[in-house]
Amino acid sequence: MTPPKYDDSSIKSLDWHEHIRTRPGMYVGKLGDGQSPDDGIYVLVKEIIDNSIDEFVMGAGRRIEVEITDNSARVRDYGRGIPLGKVVECVGKMNTGGKYDSEAFQKSVGLNGVGTKAVNALSSYFCVASHRDGKCKKAEFKQGKLAKEYPEKASTERNGTEVYFEPDADIFKNFRFLPAYMEERIWNYAYLNTGLSINLNGKIYESKNGLFDLLSNQVKDAALYPIIHCKSKDIEIALTHGGFYGEHYFSFVNGQHTAQGGTHQAAFKEGVVKGVRDFFKKDFDASDIRNYMTAAVSVRIQEPVFESQTKTKLGSTTVTPKGAALRGWMVDFIAQEIDNYLHKNPDTAKAIQEQIVKNERERKDIAGIRKLANERAKKAAINNPKLRDCKVHLIDSKNARKNETMIFITEGDSASGSITTARDVQTQAVFSLRGKPMNTFGESRKVVYENKELNLLQHALDIENGLENLRYNKVIIATDADVDGMHIRLLMTSFFLQFFPELVEEEHLYILQTPLFRVRNKKETIYCYNEKERDSAQAKLGGHSEITRFKGLGEIDPEEFGLFIGENMRLESVIMPQEANIQKMLEYYMGENIPKRTEHVINNLRTEAVAEL
């Protein structure tokens, strides 16, 4: 085989905006259509808001306005405004910004001068205006290239910066902003910046008590004792134990939500364990201390080091580039604060001790059955007919490319057979359920080990000890769109919420949307996901088109199925609103209050019917 030509002509030099547009995933992560909360279009909005937040942190501006439409975003802050002579450079010249000056932006989120430029380059239209001391400077860009620069003019508006942009549809195919996906991010900004008011599409978000408010909204009346809330200049923590199995963390660095944790979250966990052990003067098992705990931690450090441009995991080991160790600083603070708090609040200390004893008893009760179940799962894994793994894991399980891998949880031989045949064997796995899984509501953790199917699923995902070893970035429930399929979705979602809620909290759980109809004539085929799309397709193709109603996944042949689980796959992320109470929700939908549920379903069906009319 002749090697490809490699000479002077092979070496390319790209402008900054061309490089970003060529490798957009490096800067904003996933190039989805907005149906998932981690799609890149939401990262674009975040990058702009981060700059406004940094202004607030530096003491400039107490209000931010955010407007989101289907295809555009606008962010207006009332900070100092970009220096007028540098407006074009700040948004249009790579590695340019004020955050290299540690005195101007001591503990900022974005330090590399990249974020705003990435938004600019990945937008079909980008407009920036800076209002500063009675003057305004405005510039317009298209795909990162300067389209029009306006001369400075007088302004009667308050100081601050306004950015409007439209993501490029050539990069983000068929995208649409879903404002609900921005709500959680906006709430986090409010919790982490007490005194700040954010207006998102007319709704005000603000918090008076910081992480205390965040945790209060998460646990509500499920908390076993009043929330422990401690705060100093550069660190804030809040924690309690509640009715949710496992450990649940909301961690932040310089206002950035680090969904994947990192060095600060590890130090927080260590500090909690040390503080509890010091107070009780007992060497409790760490898992017994932290089980059923929900906590939040926020730190501000100089020049944080993240593991990627999307900043979801902290890698820093020091508070400042040449300062104290992050771990030691955090562990000492947290341990001392918890020890002091428990001495002053004996009722809380008693509640924590009772929870630790309960956790220890539960851990020991299931130890025997857990061992047997794990041995059974390992034997089954050698030749497990339920799991058809992807080659990435079969080759290298420990270093799998998690950001690319996914597993479909489906029911029945025909459905799993279609997906198995159509899937990308490199990155897509299939786990087949046998009929409807059991309703696990109200059951203890023992059921996960006693039920063979649930235990095998737990091992297939490798989430027995948390999400650190999660083998797939996306866990996708794929069922028929009929009553039975919806029931299976509900049962599986309830299972994960009860025993592995962090899978939902960290946005790994999805529902696969498959077409209900196929409309075709001799020249064209259109797949439709609802009646409205079906009617539009029929109108487009004409009255003699053929309409097929798919009754289940098994009726879609593998060749067709490949169209729906590839680049054009429609996924609906399972997310928990900030105000949601998991325990109450599970009690309502999975408990014994059948009459209330029936009434709820009937009323919602009526509402949908009226809306369609």
Image (cartoon, rainbow, N blue to C red):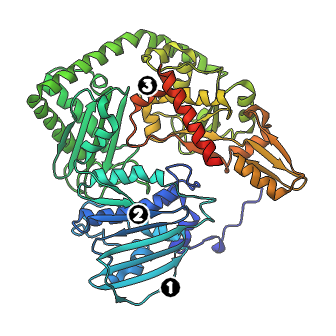
Residue 572 or residue 428, whichever sits in front: 572
Give me the C-alpha separation between circle 3 and circle 2: 36 Å
Residue 283 percent coordinates (x, y):
20, 21
Q: Amino acid at mark 3?
A: Glu
Quadrant where the N terminus lies? bottom right
Callout 3: SS: helix
Direction from residue 604 to residue 133 in the image, left or right: left
User: Element at badge 1?
Assistant: strand
Q: Residue 5 location in percent, x, y?
A: 71, 66
Residue 334 placement (x, y as % from top left): 19, 38
**Mark 1 surroundings within 10 Å by alpha-carbon count, few (fewer than 14), some (14 through 19), many (20 or more):** few
Rendered position, 406 above or below 18: above
Q: Earlier in the sequence, mark 1 or mark 3?
A: 1
Q: Nearer the viewer, mark 1 or mark 2?
A: 2
Image height check: is 214 above or below 242?
below
| Residues at circles 3 and 2 in contact by the CB criterion of under 8 Å | no
* Residue found 40% across the figure and 45% down from its top: 259
Residue 115 versus residue 403 in the image, above or below: below
Question: Quarter of the image holding residue 302?
Answer: bottom left
| Sequence-first tag of 1 and 2 | 2
- Near-viewer residue (229 or 289): 229
Q: Residue at x 46, y 71 (%)?
A: 164
> What residue is pinned by disc 2?
66
Query: How many numbered badges does the structure rendering display?
Result: 3
* Sequence order check, earlier mark of 3 and 2: 2
Question: Position of 85 compared to 394: left or right?
Answer: left
Whole-Å distance between the Cαs marked 1 and 3? Answer: 58 Å
Q: Residue placed at 54% from the left, 20% from the top?
A: 454
Q: In this view of the protein, can residue 122 be seen by the observer?
A: no
Residue 86: image location, x then y, percent? 36, 81
Residue pointed to by mark 1 = 148
Three-letter code for the amino acid on which mark 2 is drawn: Val
